[in-house]
Amino acid sequence: MKRATILLTLLVIGTSAFAQIKDPKATEVWDPVPKKVTPGATNSAPPSDAIVLFGGSNLNEWASVNDKGAAKWDVANNIMTVKPGTGNIMTNRKFGDIQLHIEWRSPLVVESEGQGRGNSGVFLQGRYEVQVLDSYESRTYSNGQAGAIYKQSIPLVNATRPHDQWETYDIIYSAPVFNEDGIKVKSAYITVIHNGVLIQNHQEILGTTEYIGLPKNDAHGKASIILQDHSNTTSFRNIWVREL
């Protein structure tokens, strides 16, 4: 029996009557069969259906937000590092619902404190920021520390490692939906796992993550992932995405 048939049966005869069915085959669903995906060799390695956005050798998947030309960040030793003053970079591809894996590290030499300590950000659809920051011991406002949905949602816990160690974000993101009149009819939602620890649990995103003012909800479709140049030499590696 197909999934749609089971749901229709539940609606027609009710769950109480459906519960009286004795044949276990009545609730088996054989079609569709999930597509086979080969996992990566490790939990951080890209699976077979992933799009690798940065594998260590070049920035071909990225462009400069400022002039839409080539991304100008530094690449060395399988790592890309913010080149302060060159601006944010964005993916050439545009995305909606995704699973994103990204690894980052704060500058090895401490450059400042608070919001100046390894500051960067991962912007989903170019608008909704998951904060990147050295929050191991340095204090800042809680909705602006590492793992925060910037100025909206405080992380459930602080899972940040010392600044000379690599951090990992695994992000599940569902894009907002807008109707034909440009009105939002469904919010974006995000789940963030930081170094294996759940820090944002299917959290509603209220709109754009503004530095000043309230969230905005202008209609949009698929858009680039953006990484932020906040004048700190924050580094990134092993970035891949799966479209959902």
Image (tube, rainbow, N blue to C red):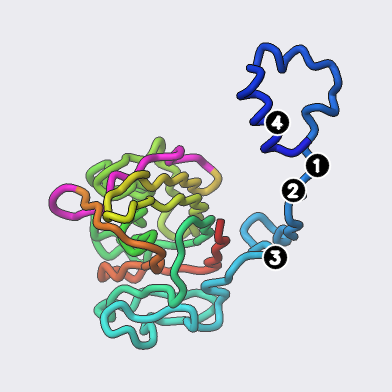
The residue beneath circle 2 is: 32
User: Disc 1 or 3, which lies upstream in sequence?
Assistant: 1
Task: Establish if 151 lies above or below 68.
Answer: above
Q: Residues within 10 Å of mark 2 (few under 14, many from 20)?
A: few
Badge 2 element:
loop
Residue at the (69%, 58%) spot, across then down: 42
Q: Where is residue 95 in the image (x, y as percent from the top left)?
A: 46, 64
Point out the residue furthest to the left here.
Answer: 213
User: Disc 2 or 3, which lies upstream in sequence?
Assistant: 2
Distance in Å between CA atoms under marks 4 and 2: 14 Å
Residues marked 3 and 4 touching at CB (< 8 Å)? no
The residue beneath circle 1 is: 30
Q: Position of residue 94 (x, y in %)?
A: 44, 69
Look at discs 2 and 3 and give the one toward the viewer: 2
Look at discs 3 and 4 and give the one toward the viewer: 4
The residue beneath circle 4 is: 6
- Give the residue type at disc 2: Pro
Q: What numbered label is drawn on residue 48?
A: 3
Q: How crowded is mark 3: few (under 14 residues within 10 Å), some or many (20 or more)?
A: few
